[in-house]
Image (cartoon, coloured by chain):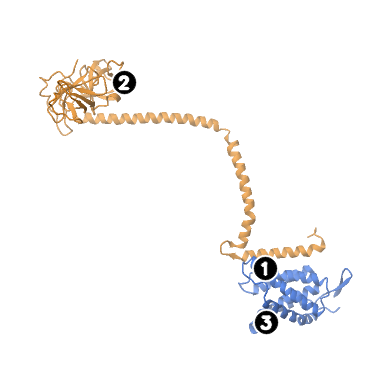
Chain colours: A orange, B blue
Amino acid sequence: MAGIPPRHKSLVLLAGVIVLQVLLLAVQIKRDSQGRLIRSWSVGAVSPFERAGSYGFGWFRDIWRNYFALRGTRKDNEDLRRENDALKLQVAQLQGKAAEADRLAVLLNFRQSHPDVPMVAARVIAGPPGTDTLTIELDRGEKDGIRRDMGVITPDGVVGKIIEAYPNTSQVLLLTDKTSGVGAKIAGSEIQSPVGGVGEPLLTMKYVPNDDEVNPGARVVTSGMDRIFPRDLPVGMIAEIKSGNPFKQIRIKPAAKIERLEEVLVLLTLHPLEMNKGNDSAAQPSAPAASNAQPAVKP
Amino acid sequence: MNDTFDLRIGESHIEVHKFRTGAIVVTSLLALVIQAWLPLGFTRAALLDLPLLVTTYFGLSRRNPSTGLLLGTAVGLVQDSLSGPTVPLGLYGIAKTVIGYLASSIGARLDTEHPAARFALTAGFFVIHQALIALTRRILLAQPEPWLNWHLFLAAFTNAIVAVFLFVLLDRLRRPS
């Protein structure tokens, strides 16, 4: 109170004492909704500074984060982009390996369910060399026991036959090729006829008389008459039937995914085979009609 | 030290009184005690505010605003503490602080020895005192306290009457000049 004029000292003292007592009251008074009055006053007095401080700090922090702290962001971004590309490649490889493992598992199951049929798995390493012939190349050859005219299948169905066997590779004529064919029959009936390719995705069943009753959707399986494929292997499903002269024009959708082959099974025998119907039956003797079968596979 | 001395303000001469040792403290405490138990025997005695009258008297006599307001503060806070949980500390304290200051300030400018002046000032201070309490209750405590009513004027009149006689008694506590 040294700097205060003497005539105002008592007034200042009065103000100070009253303020102290008002604060004393505020400490004691408790309002229902806001707690003690001193707390309400304190919050009201301090909150503007807190808001201002928070705003200022936030502004400074945003400036720092959005400008100064981003010096290394470009390099980080490039590194992350490279890492992302590598990871994408890795994921694609892993997905491919997983799909391959699935396919190989299917092949393995098929082999294990037909232990009496000698077969070897092979990987497709090349597609058709031109538009005239529909062939693929396998990574297995004579060293693996593969010979010309051996049958090639997948667990889904017939694929084609070996037309050339080299020491380490072999060439397969696909069933969809114009010159290809397989002895077949309509499942559940006695109708038999060779099935061959026409150079298109669908196959054709050539020698079914108009009098025979054939329904779309019927399954077509191997008949075993061609001495290449055992009986009852899936060939395809009848997709379209037209009347012809003197035979029906029957189009068949192949059972095997011929356009997307990656692994196949090569039947390692030139003798007639009999496939097991499931895992419970033992190996059957060779097809009984093999000796008098018509040549289903065209040269 | 002289028992009295002149306080010159302008052309007027106002006498500042001194009191016997401990007179102010003892009188104040006595007023507080009597105020506490007197209404128990006489209900109408609740109209009286003896601590206010004592604060007013010593303020008018001492004519020192600083000591006057501090005496009002002390008396008011003790009265608050004796008034129970319904009266928060500071309610009477604030009012009597202001009254102590006003009484001392006015006492330094006016001759307050005349009974009529004492009557009028005491009545006025009583109204101001109650107005301050009502203001405090309304603003800080959020309590609906009435500003003016007949009870207030009756109490002011009663206290003013009592003050005229009480102040004569308290004059005896002054040191002789």
Disc 3 target residue:
B45
State the CA–CA distance, disc 3 to disc 1.
Answer: 24 Å
Pointers 1 and 2 in contact (CB under 8 A)? no
Q: Position of residue B177 (x, y in %)?
A: 86, 78
The answer to whether B173 appears left or right of A142 in the picture is: right
Where on the picture, by quarter, is residue B51? bottom right
Q: Position of residue A81 (x, y in %)?
A: 48, 30
Residue A213 in view (yes/no) = yes
Q: Residue at x 66, y 82 (%)?
A: B44
Q: Residue type at mark 2?
A: Ile
Q: Secondary structure at mark 1?
A: helix
Mark closer to the observer (1, 2): 1
Q: Residue type at mark 3?
A: Ala
Asked if A286 appears above or below B45 in the picture, the reply is above
Classify mark 1: residues with Cα within 10 Å, few (<14), some (14-19) or many (20+). Answer: many
State the CA–CA distance, disc 1 to disc 2.
Answer: 100 Å
Q: Position of residue B138 (x, y in %)?
A: 64, 67
Q: Residue type at mark 1?
A: Leu
Tag on residue A125?
2
